[in-house]
Structures are given as structure tokens and as C-alpha cells.
Amino acid sequence: MNVYIEPTLHIVDIDSDFILTTKDKNLKMNLSDKQKDLTYKLLQKIKLNSNISLLLEDNKSFESQMLQVLMKNNIVRLHTDEEESVIIKGIHCIHGKLSFLKSIQQQISTKSKMIESNYGQSLCLDDEVLNKKEIYVYVCRESLYIATKPLNKLNTYTVDSEMMEQYASFVLMEKLRDDVLDIRDTVIIKIDLTLYNNEIDYLITEQVNEINYSNSCLVDDKLSGYTVDFNVENYFPLVQCKYQGVESNRNLSSIGYDKEDAIRNLFIILNGSGIDEQYFIRGSHTEYPLNSESFLRKFINIYFSKKIYIHHIEEDHKQFKSDNMTIIYKGKNTCNEHTLFLTLFVNHQFEGKELKISGNEIINEQLKEIMS
């Protein structure tokens, strides 16, 4: 017989109240100090999965009565060895840390088996593979990640806590039991372990651009390896996007008329700066009120005390010059050439060089998977 405690259980024990609370229940109980102590010992005994058969048969002791209350309110659940508590549909194998997988195995069909794989331990749910997926699960301090491919970057962030892994296993099984997870090859599922309702985010991994950036894997610093913050004060009325590597000292800054414009320019300089990732740039179709040569000249003069010269060489072919920096832009609806010039200007990364930007060259149609 397997005995489980609801993983969201929290006890409020103060002079005026003794409350057992979970995400679904709040039980306020009037207990003596001795009864409180017996309640703690009962929960500890259940946590250790000790034999509680005698308590189930006994209906007189305080512990047995408390156990019935806990079971009635689904704070404690029992499963006999003969029954199959959960059968997971659509999944053939789960890869993860051994202690996490063992906690999963206790909750599912007895047909499952632990095997050695290229990724360490794996839990095989059954022998039928057709139309079923393998999933890779990573338990981190605040979140649970699920993907159909290995996320090697997360190995350094996984927790080494049996209690945390057990809680995460209950959360995962609840989501699978309720059939609310949309497991796809093009997304990484992130489940919040800090909130009682365990909110789910689907982080896309392909065709990431400035439009869908906020819903992509790039907003997660553990997956992307960097953080991005927006600032509307440093270069008002424009938006600044600040990029900083999590494990490196690499810092970049981009400027745009709005967040999407700033992200578009960030992607462009990342692509041109030896960064491995490639991004799909949609191009600018937005009519920005500030998008004019006169505004650009005034902006650079006010913030940088520099003068800029703009030459129209031919249609859709402009040359920007300021001190040692010359940029030739040629392209249609690839980006906004004015804010792109500002982005290159503030990074000083092309100082003393001539940079030719062609719309056909800077568009990348695929995102190189960050999971490699």
C-alpha cells in the first residue's frame, strides 16, 4: 500500500490557530498541544511511508481519527499495490533524475520499469512506442521544465532535493492526470513550482522573432543564457533593450521605437556578432511617428553631442556617417534603419569600419536550437 501526502500541504501553527492548508482546502482545527504533536508525528510517519494498516483498522485513537479527516479532505491518499493509480497516455518514456523518476513510478502503472539510457536513468511506461513521445523533465528551484529533446543547459540548474523532486513529481502527475499538457516538439513546457495553481507556460523554440519573443524560450535566462531588460528612461522617448550574458561579461544594448523594434535590432547585432543563435527577423511594417531623419539628427545631438550626415545614394539605399562610423543600409522592410543606426552607434562595435547591411543577408529563417 502506498501512502501519499498532498504536496501543497502547509501547516500554520500559531498561538491562536492551527490550520492545515493546501491549494484546495483550509482546515482550521482546535487542538491541544499534545494533539498537535501527534498530528506532526502522524504526518512524519506517512511521509516515511511506514505501515499504517493498524491505524486504518483502529477507529478510537486520535491518530486514526485524524487520518480519516486527512483522507476525507484528500490531504492524504492511499493506493493499494493491486491498483494502477494513473496510466499516462501518449508518453512512452520519461527521462530525469533517479529520485524524481522513482517518485513518478510510485504513482503509475506497475508495468513501468527503470532502465539505463544514454541520458542516465529513464522510466519506461510500457513497451508500446508507436505514436508516443519521450519526454525530458528537469526539476529546478522554481520551475519544472518538460521537452521532447534534452535540455543540457538545465543540468546545472537542477535541484538536489528529494523533497522538491517529490513535490515536482506530484505536480507533473496532476497535470498529466488532468490531461492539460500540450506536449509538442516545438515548445518547452515550463510549470511554476512556486504558485499553488502551478501555472503553465509554453515557450516556443522555432521561428522566434521580435513579435513572438515574449512567448519564446529566449525570455528564460536558464535556457537562453542571457537576460534582457527594457528601459524607457535612459533614451526617452525611445526604448532601450539591455542584453547581459548570465555566465559571461558580454553586454549589448539596442534601441527601438518600441519593444518589438528594440528586440528586432538586438537580433540583428547578435547575428552579426559571432553569436551562435540565429533569429527570424520579420521586418518593420509599423509606421512610427518619430521615424524621421530630423528626429534622428536631433536625438544623436542631444544624447551624444554628435552630428550625423545622411546621404540618399539611390532608392532604399542610404549612407549614415558620424565621425569614424559609416553605415550603408540597403533593404526593404527588414528593419528600421534609423534605430538600427542608433543601436550600432551605442555599442561602438563598428567604429572605424564601413558596414554594409543588406536586407537579404540579415534575414535568418530558422532559430538554431538553443538546446544543443
Image: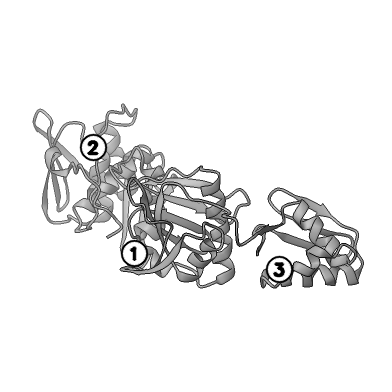
Locate residue 272, reporting x and y percent: 18, 52
Of the two numbered discs 2 and 1 on the same chain, state the one appearing first in sequence. 1
Q: Residues within 10 Å of mark 2 (few under 14, many from 20)?
A: many
Q: Residues within 10 Å of mark 1 (few under 14, many from 20)?
A: few
The mark closer to the camera, 3 or 2, is 3
Please name the residue that numbered disc 2 is placed on: 335
Q: Which one is in front, 321 or 363?
A: 363
Disc 1 to disc 3, C-alpha distance:
35 Å
> In which image quadrant can residue 8 be found?
bottom right
Residue wearing tag 1: 152
* Nearer the observer, 110 or 34: 110
Q: Is residue 148 above or below residue 336?
A: below
As measured in the structure, the alpha-carbon distance from the residue carrying label 2 to the one carrying label 1 is 33 Å
Residue at screen point 13% across, 56% down: 352
> What residue sits right under mark 3 in the picture?
46
- Distance, label 3 to label 2, CA atoms, is 61 Å
**How many C-alpha atoms fall within 10 Å of the one at disc 3: few (<14), some, or many (≥20)?**
some
Left or right for 179, reference 229: right
Q: Is residue 243 left or right of residue 356?
A: right
Instruction: Say if residue 13 shows up in the picture.
Output: no
Residue 268 image position (x, y, % from top left): 23, 47
